[in-house]
């Protein structure tokens, strides 16, 4: 579930820090994705299209952050409806009985530079387990055209291709 931690990049960018500030997700510039290994040889990616969360912090480096996040299991999408229905079934997430995946952050610790470790409790299907995720903090800006010099979108991007091949 590292992708939940990585999602915080979008949350922590683009807003100025103030005393005891509550931060909400900018859903236009955020996404909640996941990747799971299938048959030990390939990765299946997906996302949750319905989610919400907030972060409350008073320190500029967010080390005192209180984080709450939830994703709607019924919004899961892997690009293949039969697989999505299977993931929503009782065999996996059991969306009928447990419609939400939740995360309650307990602490954000600076590792070095812009790298952090986020600890908290992740609850899936009514089972809560402690998790630690890697977080990359890209900084804050007052507005997209002021401190960023007008560069809203990077000239670089990343394409992840995961393949599973079947011998014919």
Image (cartoon, rainbow, N blue to C red):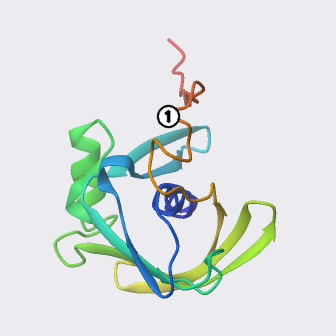
Image vertical order of residue 64 relative to residue 165, above or below: below
Q: Position of residue 79 (x, y in %)?
A: 29, 36
Q: Give the total of numbered labels.
A: 1
Residue at x 51%, y 57% (from the top left corner): 13
User: Residue at the left extreme?
Assistant: 96
Residue at x 36%, y 64% (from the top left corner): 25
- Residue 103 makes an appearance in the image: no
User: Residue at the front extreme?
Assistant: 146
Is 47 in front, or is 31?
31
Question: Is 116 on the left or on the right of 67, as rendered?
Answer: right
Res 90 → quadrant: bottom left
Is 130 in front, or is 9?
9
Res 98 → quadrant: bottom left
The secondary structure type at the circle numbered 1 is: loop
- Residue 93 makes an appearance in the image: yes
Image vertical order of residue 65 relative to residue 141, above or below: below
Q: Position of residue 121 (x, y in %)?
A: 51, 84
Image vertical order of residue 65 relative to residue 17, above or below: below
User: Residue at the right extreme?
Assistant: 112
Is 63 in front, or is 105?
63
10 Å crowding of disc 1: few (<14), some (14-19), many (20+): few
Image vertical order of residue 134 relative to residue 27, above or below: below
Question: Is 3 on the left or on the right of 82, as rendered?
Answer: right
Q: Which residue is mark 1?
A: 150
Q: Position of residue 85 (x, y in %)?
A: 21, 51
Q: Position of residue 88 (x, y in %)?
A: 25, 60
Residue at x 50%, y 11% (from the top left corner): 168
């Amino acid at each position: 579930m590292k992708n939940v931690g990585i999602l915080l990049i979008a949350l922590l960018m683009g807003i100025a820090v103030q005393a005891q500030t509550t931060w909400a997700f900018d859903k236009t510039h955020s996404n909640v994705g996941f990747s799971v290994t299938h048959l030990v040889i390939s990765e299946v990616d997906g996302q949750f299209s319905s989610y919400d969360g907030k972060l409350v912090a008073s320190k500029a480096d967010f080390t005192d952050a209180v984080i709450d996040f939830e994703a709607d299991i019924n919004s899961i999408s892997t690009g293949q409806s039969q697989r999505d229905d299977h993931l929503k079934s009782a065999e996996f997430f059991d969306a009928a009985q447990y419609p939400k995946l939740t995360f309650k952050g307990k602490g954000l610790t600076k590792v070095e530079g812009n790298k952090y470790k986020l600890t908290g409790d992740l609850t899936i299907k009514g089972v809560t387990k402690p998790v630690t995720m890697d977080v990359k903090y890209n900084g804050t800006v007052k507005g997209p055209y002021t401190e960023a010099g007008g560069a809203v979108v990077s000239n670089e991007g990343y394409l992840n291709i995961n393949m599973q091949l079947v011998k014919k």
